[in-house]
Image: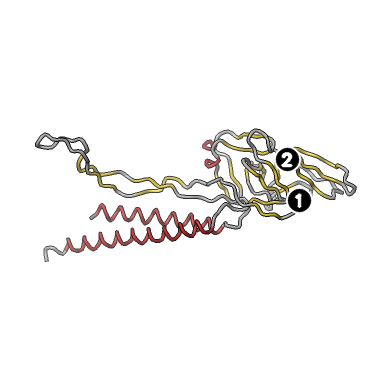
Amino acid sequence: MIRGLWSAATGMQGQQLQLDVIANNLANVNTVGFKKSRVDFEDLFYQNLKLAGALTADGTQVPVGMQIGLGVRPVAVPKLFTQGEYQLTNQELDWAIEGRGFFRVIMGGEEYYTRAGNFKLDRDGYIVTPDGARLQPEFAVPQGTARIEVTPDGIITALGPRGETLAQAQLTLYDFTNPAGLYAVGRNLFKSTDAAGDVIEGNPGQNGFGTIAQGYLEMSNVDIVEEMVKMIITQRAYESNSKGVLTADQLLEIANNLKR
């Protein structure tokens, strides 16, 4: 009974975490460049009442053992870097990465990586995120620029009123062997870690990197229907485990009242 009580309790804790992750996914369904998370679980230790292959008193061999599981625990909450849906905006500073890669930005002297391409211009003409993180390599748009063009292979061009080229630069993308190892810091930003591996840099459209789609945004990769179904399953699993706790408690109460 005690085993069942604690096993069901671990199930409730695990499903609560699952619900928290689902709620965060749904909250960010319209966040540009957001990557959904999931919870990975593993079973806990087992109590071995009888080992498979053990010999009985009669000298025969036990074909199947008796192992009682002791519950579940979450072991990871990884980000899933699948491609999000594209949204047409026709804004010249909205850029979507079609394929692998991240933009690199600097904020407060620290380097960060992002899939969100909803850029702006700061007062000095530099391309920045909505929070002011400056795109790397830096590109300052000259005064008198009429429009900005970005090719699929990442050539950024500032054009004057008559279509003349005022400035030009090459956009660089960055990637990691294990993007799931990146540390999410909020604001659509990620920080590199040892788990993510060494940073790999390259030009859009080359060496496995994605291309740039100007006038588009990559939206969240959250599927509302999928998350709602997962929420229902999680709720039912939580209820089932709570009934397991209640049943174990009732059995303990019966056992405590046997002497009466």
| Secondary element at image label 1 | loop
Q: Which residue is mark 1?
A: 92
Q: Quadrant of residue 63?
A: top left
Most foreground residue, 91 or 257: 91
- Tag 1: amino acid: Glu
Q: Measured from the top left, where is residue 205 in percent x and y?
A: 68, 37
Residue shown at the point (61%, 55%) measured from the top left: 31
Residue shown at the point (51%, 59%) measured from the top left: 225
Q: Which residue is mark 2?
A: 154
| Secondary element at image label 2 | loop
Q: Measured from the top left, where is residue 174 in percent x and y?
A: 64, 38
Farthest residue, direction right: 162
- Tag 2: amino acid: Gly
- In the rendered structure, the answer to whether residue 190 lies left or right of residue 235 reads right
Most foreground residue, 256 or 219: 219
Residue shown at the point (60%, 57%) measured from the top left: 30
- In the rendered structure, the answer to whether residue 46 lies left or right of residue 74 reads left
Residue 197 to residue 29: above or below: above
